[in-house]
Image (spheres, rainbow, N blue to C red):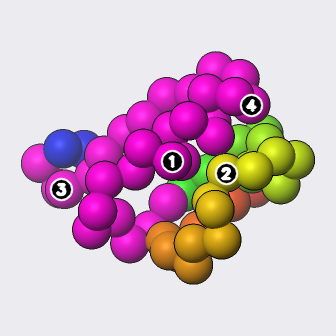
Amino acid sequence: MALAGAVVLVADDPDAVRRAWRSLPDGIDLVILTPAAARALESGPATGGALRPLTAVMPS
């Protein structure tokens, strides 16, 4: 995936999801989330009000 310019971050629990979100490098335009990761971002402060990046949630 790296050859295509994709960055893969693994997060095993809600806190790790929020840490990964906050650590996204500049220039990331799209994040594809698992349903569990999306729930983790809804349930706690993660984005600090940031409007970037565009997100998509994979179907369950």
* 3D distance between C-alphas at marks 2 and 4: 10 Å
Magenta span of residues: 3-31
- Say what secondary structure mark 4 lies in: helix
Labels 2 and 4: the sequence-earlier one: 4
Labels 1 and 3: the sequence-earlier one: 3
Q: Nearer the viewer, mark 4 or mark 1?
A: 1
The quadrant of the rendering that contains the N terminus is: top left
* 3D distance between C-alphas at marks 3 and 2: 27 Å
Q: Which of marks 1 and 3 is in front?
A: 1
Q: Is residue 11 magenta?
A: yes
Q: Which amino acid does label 3 sit on?
A: Ala
Q: Which amino acid does label 1 sit on?
A: Arg
Looking at the image, which residue is at 83% across and 54% down?
42
Other-residue count near label 2 (Cα within 10 Å), few / some / many at <14 / 14–19 / ≥20: some
Looking at the image, which residue is at 87% across and 47% down?
43
Residue receiving disc 4: 14
* 10 left or right, relative to 24: right
Q: Position of residue 6 (x, y in %)?
A: 28, 52
Q: Residue furthest left?
A: 3
Residue receiving disc 3: 4
